[in-house]
């Protein structure tokens, strides 16, 4: 019996010591100490042992069991330690590695240009207001003296939502909202997105931005318009900038003009940038048409005013000497990072 037990123990130890995996230990435990295990079988055979020998044999079986359990435990602990060490090794953090670079965002050229324009006008006491991008035909056209069938309507290819509702083609619609509110005087600019059913090319996009401006008060004259817009041009493009007003036509202003600025690249001599002209067109403007006043409930005999509209992208392109508007919308980080 003693030899049998010693054999079981040495078999068990042999298997434990040569095992290579943690779950193998469980198999060994079952094989020797489990209900159907070898040692248990010996215990079951106790009934054949002479009663006086039983305590001694019992003791031997217990010793054997204890020995096997002890070695199993040691082995299990050493497996677990090895596993832990391996895990630690694979998860080590090299604190000397350089950190990940956090890229700082910055403003889009459109936004920089807009903030600059806003700053200039806010400095002159204007308020910045906004209006709806989805608009009634009435505000976008009719109340601006562009009735049904007017040729100016065809000049702005419009996205219609239905007969009466459209995506605004110009921020001039905000003029009407402001006048309807009836709080006079008005001194406002209104930047925002406008939409036209145009194909994309270097100077066109179906969606772009305008900045509308309007001043209404008693005794506002064309001189106020000229003085204001000249100051605006100087602040935006430099103190040496000259301006030139050319007669033009817009249905909602009378008289109307377009303003050119002297080319800030060549100073007016003519270069590639201004296409040899020496001048660059930059905005449309004029004195608010009496009929427009009347439609919005303002008495043109009491009040006068001027208005203007600037393309924001145009300003950004000029200021940063970008020759293709598409670059402003493609969101190529390599391009945008330059500003
Ligand atoms: N709304 C015009 C356009 O989109 C620009 C414009 C011209 C606005 C003259 C004005 C203005 O306020 O007085 O072409």
Image (cartoon, rainbow, N blue to C red):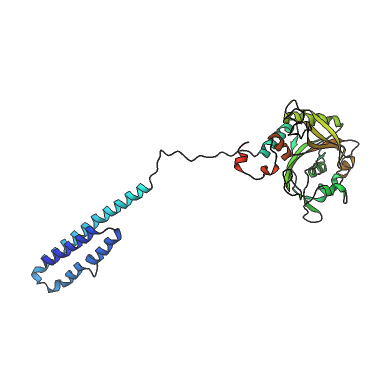
Is residue 221 in view? no
Q: Which quadrant holds residue 177? A: top right
Count all numbered tags in the image, as a single digit. 0
Q: Which quadrant holds residue 219? A: top right
Q: Is residue 209 above or below residue 159?
A: above
**Residue farthest to the left?**
52
- The quarter of the rendering in which ligand 1 is drawn is top right
Closer to the camera in the image, 278 or 158:
278
Residue 149 location in percent, x, y?
88, 51
**Residue farthest to the top?**
240
Q: Which quadrant holds residue 302? A: top right
Q: Is residue 149 above or below residue 2?
A: above
On the rendered structure, is 152 left or right of 105? right
Residue 297 location in percent, x, y?
87, 43
- Residue at 54% in and 39% down: 103
Q: Is residue 11 above or below residue 236?
A: below
Task: Pick the quarter of the image with the N terminus.
Answer: bottom left
On the rendered structure, is 170 left or right of 316? right
Is residue 224 in view? yes
Task: Pick the quarter of the image with the C terminus.
Answer: top right
Closer to the camera in the image, 314 or 112:
314
- Residue at 28% in and 61% down: 24
Residue 36 location in percent, x, y?
23, 70
**Residue farthest to the bottom?**
48
């Amino acid at each position: 019996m003693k030899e049998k037990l010693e054999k079981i123990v040495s078999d068990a130890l042999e298997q434990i010591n040569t095992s290579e995996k943690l779950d193998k230990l469980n198999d060994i435990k079952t094989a020797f100490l489990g209900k159907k295990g070898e040692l248990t079988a010996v215990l079951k055979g106790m009934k054949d042992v002479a009663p006086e020998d039983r305590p001694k044999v019992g003791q031997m079986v217990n010793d054997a069991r204890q020995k096997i359990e002890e070695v199993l435990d040691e082995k299990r602990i050493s497996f677990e330690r090895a596993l832990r060490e391996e895990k630690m090794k694979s998860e080590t953090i090299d604190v000397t590695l350089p950190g990940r670079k956090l890229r700082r965002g910055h403003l889009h050229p459109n936004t920089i240009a807009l903030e600059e324009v806003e700053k200039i006008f806010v400095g002159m006491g204007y308020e910045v207001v906004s209006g709806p991008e989805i608009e009634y035909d009435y505000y976008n056209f009719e109340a601006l003296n562009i009735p049904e069938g007017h040729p100016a309507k065809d000049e702005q290819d419009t996205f219609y939502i239905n007969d009466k509702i459209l995506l605004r083609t110009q921020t001039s619609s905000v003029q009407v909202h402001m006048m309807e509110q009836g709080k006079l005087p008005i001194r406002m600019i209104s930047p925002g997105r406008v939409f036209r059913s145009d194909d994309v090319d270097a100077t066109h996009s179906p969606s772009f931005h305008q900045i509308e401006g309007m001043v209404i008060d008693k005794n506002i004259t064309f001189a106020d318009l000229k003085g204001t817009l000249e100051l605006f041009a100087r602040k935006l493009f430099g103190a040496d900038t000259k301006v030139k007003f050319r007669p033009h036509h817009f249905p909602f202003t009378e008289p109307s003009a377009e303003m050119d600025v002297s080319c800030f690249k060549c100073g007016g001599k003519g270069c590639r940038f201004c296409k040899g002209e020496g001048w660059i067109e930059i905005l449309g403007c004029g004195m608010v048409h009496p009929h427009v006043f009347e439609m919005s409930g303002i008495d043109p005999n009491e009040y006068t005013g001027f208005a203007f509209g600037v393309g924001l992208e145009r300003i950004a392109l000029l200021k940063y000497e970008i020759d293709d508007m598409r670059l402003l919308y493609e969101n190529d980080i390599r391009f945008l990072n330059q500003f």
